[in-house]
Amino acid sequence: MKNFLENIQLIKHTQIKLPVNKSEFIRSFKQHVDEGHIGAFSSMFEAFSSSKNRYKGNITQNTFEIRRRREFFDRTSYLAHATGSFRQQNDHIVIDTEINGFSNFLIPFYVIITVFYLFFIFMIMTNVESSGILLVFIIFHAFLMYGIPYFVIKKRVKNTAIDLEKELFFMTQRNHNS
């Protein structure tokens, strides 16, 4: 399943190389990420938080798991989460990141709508009189119901990858200038 999600670009792998020491980076990274669980139900009241940090997650000495914090009236709040590891390579830190936008909560949605469409297509095919126009409408509707979530998730993964790389780069620049 993971290979399939990578092929349809709902999981993206990136590698970021930054000119900073690993211990300095981890210290700065922890300052810019609120510690906490990033599961599906952990963000119900997150918009009421007064924290200025944009990300929430867990950071250890070699790995991290973060996602963007949800805010009020923010339609662009990304549901994609990033997991990764970092290692020191000479005078740089290399960050290997996997950004995943697919949630297991979408599986029942796709199963239910698949059953729904199969049922309606079967019902339309048994009624021979007016099957042509209804069949075209059902197929068009199915493409929308499958396609819209796919393109939204794909866009979120892409935006999360870009934003995370920018944040990590500027985080190291602020520390060098301080």
Image: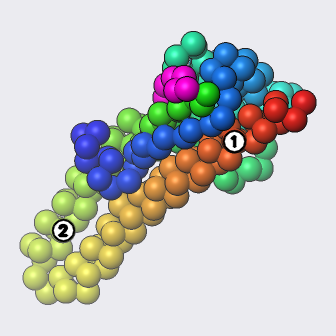
Which residue does the numbered mark 2 point to in the structure image?
121
Q: Give residue 83's position: percent from left, percent from top.
A: 49, 30
The magenta segment: 83-90
State which quarter of the image contains the N terminus. top left
Give the distance between the C-alpha atoms of the residues marked 2 and 1, in whole angstroms: 51 Å
Q: Give residue 114's position: percent from left, percent from top.
A: 25, 55
Q: Is residue 75 magenta?
A: no
Which residue does the numbered mark 1 point to in the structure image?
169
Which residue is rendered at x = 25% and y = 47% of the image?
4
Is residue 135 shown above or below 69? below
Q: Nearer the viewer, residue 123 or 9?
A: 9
Q: Which image quadrant is residue 45 in? A: top right
Q: Amino acid at mark 1?
A: Phe
Is residue 44 shown above or below 117? above
Quick check: 49 left or right of 164? right
Q: How many marks?
A: 2
